[in-house]
Image (spheres, helix red, strand yellow):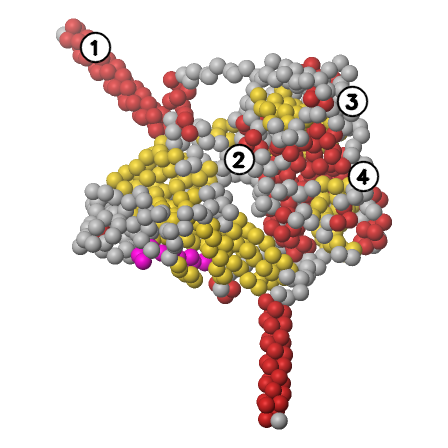
């Protein structure tokens, strides 16, 4: 009886315990994984990198959009450490936004790549940009001496590009404002999952296409995933319905019935409308008007990201008086490196990087230079301390630090012409701050120090890169950050590949554009030749579908056969007759309509193949694969790029032109000339004076 009672009591206790554990587990699971939780992996190391030295630090960045309600962020760091690392003395510390949150000792006994997964405390995260710092202290020398050197090349920590930040989040509901829609349209998760699109009517008019590419270019500029593109689809495309965020650009009469019903019957006399509407699970930003010019103007507003981020309602009216233009791009000769100055702390090698923005068609010319003003601590070992300036990771000069100039030092360096810098570039100021007897002193994070002052600047002379080569792309279609009189000639017959091709071209052009200015006009292939004068032309289509390509087949580097069925061999590449039907090409030739302009033929025997070619100039991740002026590609990923134009002989610059470009030399020449003039005038006066005296003596 007693045993039975004990058994019953035990059974009841176990049942109650299991019930409580079940409820606890369910509650924990519910708290950890809320309904609608999504996961996004953000790579934060673009390429495998090695951190060398006993104390090495690097910073990486990742974004958290404001509409993400973050539940957890896990750093997955793939690494490998030196086999000589002392496990008891080596460590790696991770910090987020300047606050350390995790340290560990790497295991040298593991020969292969290791993975560390650690959660970042949510209270340390910030909306927008977050800075993840990795500090490695890898010790390899057994410290059996009173003082032993610790800076050796065997102190390395390898970090791999497979490292990522795994963010788990729930998207906040869209608040119904244009501003919120605008942020989400180009956000990480939206673009990576291809949940967005620009949409136009199936047979969009020239002005509807113009308006669409302005909007597309503005969104492409805001897209941080530069290897992903924003599509352009027709309303009747099979993929349109599956998009969660849509920007619909159309004249009011051409809107689909569902969107027309959603926006109602607005007064569009002398007005254009930008309105956010919802249809089921799809949000659509409708850009519409009855007047073509106003439709284009409204799309230029959409391309102005500064204005879009200010629209807190679901509706915006655009009329003739609405100012939609972005500020004019100012190519300044003097570029300030830092607005308030930058401090570098800690011993040994310390770097500060600066990003300099320059239009893609601009290259640095002669007589450009960098002037760096700085100061530094006085407790350095000045026999071993120095500063080095690098441009695009290439050193251009160094200077030894001295105690006498510690409170105010400077260095001026010319930018070498052979660096061949064009477009955006980076400047790195690297200090080697060495302490005396540092091997006997524990490392200090706050000393020594150096400070780059706000007087540091670049003095840039720039020139146009005007040769028609893909090396200089997106020239000639962009110049100084604005569209440069672009004319797009579409094929007679359009399909989904045609719209995707246009999207590819203007995703990259939009990334390089610095504003919403300049013109992009669309034409059918029967456009008159006079209309294309003074225009840089993009011709899209096949031999049969585009008259511009057909009429200028003889000028192409990859020519079609007599029937226009496929592309033929040329002096650079042998092409089988069947293979010529299965390739797409990009060909950048001189405009046949007017000298000084260009024509880009995006062509292939079928629309699928010219779309394939357009993918090569769709993003910055692919455009580096093309060079020269003629490129072919196929479905297998084979890319053949050639230069067909003959290289021009380099112009021999005259002494006069060299002097005119060098302002310092020009000033010296002017000063010397003035001195010579003064000497000459003085000699003339002296000669006249002595001649007069001689005449007086002769009379006497």
User: Which residue is disc 3 drawn over?
Assistant: 544
The answer to whether any part of residue 368 appears in the image is: yes
User: Which residue is disc 1 drawn over?
Assistant: 691
Whether the magenta-drawn stretch holds residue 140 is answered as no
Side of 164 relative to 608 (left or right)? left
User: Which residue is disc 4 drawn over?
Assistant: 202
Side of 265 relative to 372 (left or right)? right
What secondary structure is found at the residue carrying circle 2? loop
Please tell me how crowded label 3 is: few (under 14), some (14-19), or many (20+) other residues with Cα within 10 Å. some
Query: Which residue is located at x 57 percent, y 17 percent?
Result: 645
Q: Real-space Cα distance between discs 3 and 2?
A: 37 Å
Please tell me how crowded label 1 is: few (under 14), some (14-19), or many (20+) other residues with Cα within 10 Å. few
Residue 523: x, y in percent?
Answer: 75, 29
**Tag count in the figure?**
4
Closer to the chain start, of discs 2 and 4, is 4
Q: Nearer the viewer, residue 538 or 170?
A: 170
Q: Real-space Cα distance between discs 4 and 3?
A: 21 Å
> What span is colored magenta in the figure?
88-97
Q: Is residue 330 above or below residue 82?
A: above
Marks 1 and 4: which is nearer the front? 4
Side of 577 relative to 203 (left or right)? left
Q: Residue furthest bottom?
A: 1
Q: Nearer the viewer, residue 188 or 90?
A: 90
Query: Which residue is located at x 38 percent, y 37 percent?
Result: 390
User: Which residue is disc 2 drawn over?
Assistant: 359
Please tell me how crowded label 4 is: few (under 14), some (14-19), or many (20+) other residues with Cα within 10 Å. some
Q: Nearer the viewer, residue 53 or 479?
A: 53
Where is residue 382, by image quadrant? top left
Closer to the chain start, of discs 3 and 1, is 3
* Contact, mark 3 vs mark 1 (Cβ under 8 Å): no
């Amino acid at each position: 009886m007693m045993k039975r009672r004990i058994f019953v009591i035990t059974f009841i206790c176990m049942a109650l315990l299991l019930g409580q554990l079940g409820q606890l587990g369910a509650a924990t699971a519910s708290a950890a994984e809320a309904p609608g939780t999504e996961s996004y992996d953000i790579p934060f190391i673009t390429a495998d990198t090695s951190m060398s030295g006993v104390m090495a630090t690097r910073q990486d960045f990742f974004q958290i959009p404001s509409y993400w309600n973050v539940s957890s962020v896990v750093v997955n760091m793939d690494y490998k450490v030196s086999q000589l690392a002392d496990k008891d003395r080596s460590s790696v510390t991770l910090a987020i936004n300047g606050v350390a949150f995790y340290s560990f000792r790497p295991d040298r006994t593991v020969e292969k790549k290791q993975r560390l997964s650690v959660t970042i405390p949510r209270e340390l995260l910030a909306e927008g940009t977050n800075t993840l710092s990795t500090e490695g202290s890898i010790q390899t020398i057994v410290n059996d001496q009173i003082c032993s050197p610790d800076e050796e090349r065997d102190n390395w920590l390898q970090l791999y590009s497979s490292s990522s930040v795994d963010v788990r989040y729930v998207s906040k509901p869209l608040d119904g404002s244009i501003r919120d829609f605008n942020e989400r349209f180009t956000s990480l998760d939206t673009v990576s999952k291809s949940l967005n699109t620009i949409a136009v009517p199936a047979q969009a008019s020239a002005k509807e296409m113009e308006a669409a590419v302005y909007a597309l270019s503005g969104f492409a500029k805001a897209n941080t995933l530069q290897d992903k593109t924003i599509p352009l689809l027709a309303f009747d495309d099979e993929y349109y319905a599956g998009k969660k965020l849509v920007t619909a650009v159309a004249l009011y009469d051409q809107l689909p019935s569902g969107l027309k019903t959603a926006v109602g019957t607005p007064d569009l006399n002398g007005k254009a409308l930008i309105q956010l509407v919802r249809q089921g699970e799809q949000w659509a930003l409708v850009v519409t008007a009855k007047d073509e010019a106003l439709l284009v103007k409204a799309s230029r507003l959409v391309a102005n990201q500064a204005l879009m981020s200010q629209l807190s309602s679901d509706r915006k009216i655009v009329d003739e008086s609405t100012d939609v233009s972005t500020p004019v791009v100012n190519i300044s000769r003097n570029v300030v490196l830092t607005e308030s100055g930058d401090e570098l702390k800690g011993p040994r090698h310390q770097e500060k990087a600066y990003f300099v923005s320059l239009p893609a068609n601009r290259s640095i010319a002669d007589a450009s230079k960098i002037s760096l003003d700085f100061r530094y601590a006085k407790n350095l070992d000045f026999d071993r301390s120095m500063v080095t300036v690098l441009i695009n990771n290439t050193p251009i000069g160094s200077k030894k630090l001295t105690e006498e100039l510690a409170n105010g030092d400077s260095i001026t360096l010319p930018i070498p012409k052979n660096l061949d810098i064009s477009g955006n570039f980076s400047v790195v100021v690297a200090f080697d701050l060495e302490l005396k007897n540092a091997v006997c002193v524990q490392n200090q994070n706050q000393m020594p120090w150096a400070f780059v002052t706000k007087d540091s600047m670049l003095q840039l002379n720039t020139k146009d890169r005007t040769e028609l080569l893909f090396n200089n792309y997106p020239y000639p279609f962009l110049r100084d950050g604005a569209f440069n009189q672009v004319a797009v000639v579409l094929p007679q017959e359009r399909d989904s590949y045609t719209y995707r091709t246009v999207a590819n071209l203007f995703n990259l052009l939009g990334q390089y554009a610095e504003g919403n200015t300049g013109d992009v006009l669309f034409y059918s292939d029967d456009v008159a030749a006079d209309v294309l004068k003074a225009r840089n032309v993009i011709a899209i289509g096949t031999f049969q579908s585009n008259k511009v390509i057909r009429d200028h087949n003889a000028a192409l580097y990859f020519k079609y056969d007599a029937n226009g069925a496929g592309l033929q061999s040329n002096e650079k590449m042998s092409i089988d007759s069947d293979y010529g039907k299965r390739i797409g090409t990009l060909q950048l030739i001189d405009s046949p309509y007017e000298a000084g302009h260009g024509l880009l033929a995006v062509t292939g025997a079928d629309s699928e193949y010219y779309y394939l070619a357009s993918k090569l100039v769709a993003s910055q991740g692919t455009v580096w694969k093309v060079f020269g002026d003629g490129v072919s590609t196929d479905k297998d990923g084979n890319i053949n790029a050639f230069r067909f134009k003959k290289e021009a002989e380099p112009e021999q610059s005259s002494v006069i032109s060299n002097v005119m470009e060098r302002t310092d030399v020009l000033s010296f020449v002017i000063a010397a000339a003035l001195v010579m003039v003064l000497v000459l005038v003085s000699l003339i006066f002296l000669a006249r004076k002595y001649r007069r005296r001689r005449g007086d003596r002769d009379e006497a």
